[in-house]
């Protein structure tokens, strides 16, 4: 049986572009169910992804949370 990858959803396009440039594993995109004009971007949820998100948004990453 194949295990599902943990997924982290990103709603901001500029964050999506930055994460792709930092070589994070982009999985797929889908329309936002509340507003079809917008897309949601799914990434494999890894520690590297979380650290990159924290760095790009000006926060600190704490792996204990």
Image (cartoon, grey):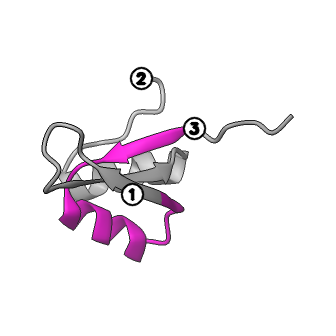
Q: Nearer the viewer, residue 8 or 47?
A: 8
Q: In this view, does 54 lie above or below 1?
A: below
- Tag of residue 29: 1
Locate the C terminus and report the quarter of the image it occupies. Answer: top left
Distance Cα–Cα, label 3 vs label 1: 15 Å
Q: Which residue is drawn at 36% across and 44% down?
A: 9
Locate the N terminus and report the quarter of the image it occupies. Answer: top right
- State which tag comes first along the sequence, 3 or 2: 3
Tell me if label 2 and label 1 are in contact, CB under 8 Å: no
Q: Which of marks 3 and 1 is in front?
A: 1
Residue at the limit of the structure toward the bottom, as seen here: 21
Distance Cα–Cα, label 2 vs label 1: 27 Å
Magenta extent? 6-27
Q: Quadrant of residue 62?
A: top left
- Tag of residue 65: 2
Q: Name the residue under label 3.
A: 6
Q: In which quarter of the image is residue 56?
A: bottom left
């Amino acid at each position: 049986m194949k295990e599902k990858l943990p997924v982290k959803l990103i709603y901001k396009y500029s964050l999506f572009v930055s994460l792709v440039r930092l070589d994070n594993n982009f999985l797929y995109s889908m329309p936002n169910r509340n507003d079809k004009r917008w897309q949601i971007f799914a990434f494999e949820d890894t520690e590297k992804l979380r650290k990159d998100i924290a760095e790009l948004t000006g926060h600190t990453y704490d792996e204990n949370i």
